[in-house]
Image (cartoon, rainbow, N blue to C red):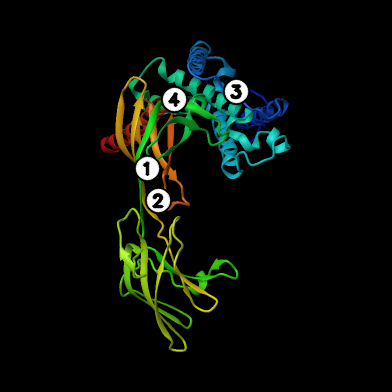
């Protein structure tokens, strides 16, 4: 049996020609990126990017239908090239996930190649664009003539095309702004985290109240000479309450009393106070290795009050404030037409207003629960509904695929 080895670029083209074409396309993208000074691809905003995307889709479908018998067009919409482009996109995405984005010095060789901004670079854009052409051509051949048997293929591939194309072309329209607001005040300016440039919002946000709940404080051993908490020598207490004990080498501590909100009274002893002003106090009995025992009050302190600590002869027993449990902002959002909405913003519980989503982002961490500042994140992504449509189409295609498989198994 004589095996005839196929020559390069002998029709029909297969994986090796597709791999070579993909490598050349990625290399050309890096050349364009470097020649452009590392600026990357500049995509116009709405409505121009939407018009360009519709024209691109129409041209791709038109070429696929008009030249479906052309050998070059068949190869361009074939599986070998599609798989090679997917591998290239995956490798470029891996670079974007591993290499810190915006982590190189401006003007460096890596920055000029777009390594630090890979998702807006020419190699990534060219690879995605070629893959969209490949996907669009294969989709056109299944759309016309239409057959119910092709519905699963159409739903999956059309959804993939819509999600990828709209996510890529619409990335430039994504707005993500940080809105700092002081309690009792209104703000309609947001700031980008990358540049810090203020941008006026189409609405204003009034912060009525900011509140923060904390976990119970912890007892720790502090070394003032080295300015560090001796974690390896201490036993952290997750919940301080009356009767709780803690032990270190040669030191035993018993919590005799605990007040979550208290202030020093006229007699020099802590007294219960309201939550707005009070701080945690704990009365502890400290017993050393020499069987010496004493009782002292310690406190976490606050931005207005110094903490109370227990001197252990070179070390200090301290009570640190509890970590944040939850925090929320009571806000009123209003546009220039008088439409308003009152809501409580919490982490991972956004509030929608107009076509924006408002998230509780942060606060003044130095002030803790006395913070008068709330940081709210305002996000607007006009392309998100279309991207979701693509995902739902992909899910529908997968459901239809499994349904057809179950049906064929049942018929068998």
Question: Where in the figure is residue 171, as x and y percent of width and height?
Answer: 50, 28
Determine whether the residue tagged by mark 2 lies in a helix, strand or loop: helix
Marking on residue 216: none
Q: Is residue 250 above or below residue 239?
A: below
Determine whether the residue tagged by mark 1 lies in a helix, strand or loop: loop
Marking on residue 42: 3
Residue 7 appears in the rendering: no
Residue that badge 2 annotates:
370
Pair 4/3: label in front: 3
- Which residue appears at 57% of the width and 41% of the height? 94
CA gap, disc 2 to disc 1?
A: 22 Å
Q: Who comes first in sequence, dot 2 or dot 3?
A: 3
CA gap, disc 2 to disc 4?
A: 47 Å
Q: Quadrant of the C terminus?
A: top left
Q: Residues within 10 Å of mark 2 (few under 14, many from 20)?
A: some
Q: Is residue 128 above or below residue 374?
A: above
């Amino acid at each position: 049996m004589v095996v005839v080895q196929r020559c390069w670029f002998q029709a029909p083209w297969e994986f090796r020609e597709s791999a070579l074409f993909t490598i050349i396309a990625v290399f050309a993208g890096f050349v364009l990126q470097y020649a452009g000074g590392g600026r990357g691809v500049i995509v116009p905003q709405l409505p121009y990017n939407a018009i360009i995307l519709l024209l691109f889709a129409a041209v791709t479908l038109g070429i696929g239908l008009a030249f479906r018998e052309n050998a070059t067009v068949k190869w361009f919409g074939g599986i070998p090239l599609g798989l090679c482009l997917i591998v290239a996109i995956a490798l470029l995405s891996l670079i974007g996930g591993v290499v810190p984005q915006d982590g190189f010095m401006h003007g460096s060789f890596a920055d000029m190649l777009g390594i630090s901004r890979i998702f807006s670079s020419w190699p990534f854009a060219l690879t995605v664009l070629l893959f969209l052409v490949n996907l669009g051509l294969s989709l056109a051949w299944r759309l016309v003539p239409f057959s119910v048997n092709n519905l699963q293929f159409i739903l999956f591939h059309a959804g993939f095309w819509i999600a990828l194309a709209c996510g890529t072309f619409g990335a430039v329209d994504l707005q993500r702004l940080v809105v700092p607001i002081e309690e009792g005040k209104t703000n309609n300016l947001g700031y980008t985290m990358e540049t810090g440039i203020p941008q006026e919002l189409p609405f204003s946000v009034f912060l009525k109240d900011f509140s923060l709940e904390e976990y119970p404080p912890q007892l720790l051993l502090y070394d003032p000479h080295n300015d560090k908490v001796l974690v390896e020598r201490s036993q952290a207490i997750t919940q301080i309450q009356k009767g709780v004990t803690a032990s270190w080498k040669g030191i035993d501590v018993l919590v005799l009393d605990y007040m979550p909100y208290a202030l020093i009274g006229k007699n020099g002893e802590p007294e219960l106070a309201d939550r707005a002003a009070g701080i945690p106090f704990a009365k502890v009995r400290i017993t050393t290795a020499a069987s010496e025992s004493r009782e002292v009050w310690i406190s976490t302190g606050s931005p207005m009050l110094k903490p109370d600590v227990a001197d252990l002869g070179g070390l200090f027993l301290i009570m640190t404030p509890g970590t944040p449990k939850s925090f929320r902002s009571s806000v009123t959002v209003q546009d220039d037409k008088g439409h308003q909405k009152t809501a409580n913003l919490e982490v991972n519980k956004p509030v929608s207003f107009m076509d924006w989503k408002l998230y509780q982002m942060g606060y003044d961490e130095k002030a803790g629960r006395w913070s008068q500042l709330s940081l709210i994140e305002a996000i607007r992504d006009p392309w998100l509904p279309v991207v979701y449509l693509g995902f739902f189409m992909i899910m529908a295609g997968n459901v239809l695929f499994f349904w057809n498989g179950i049906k064929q198994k049942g018929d068998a």
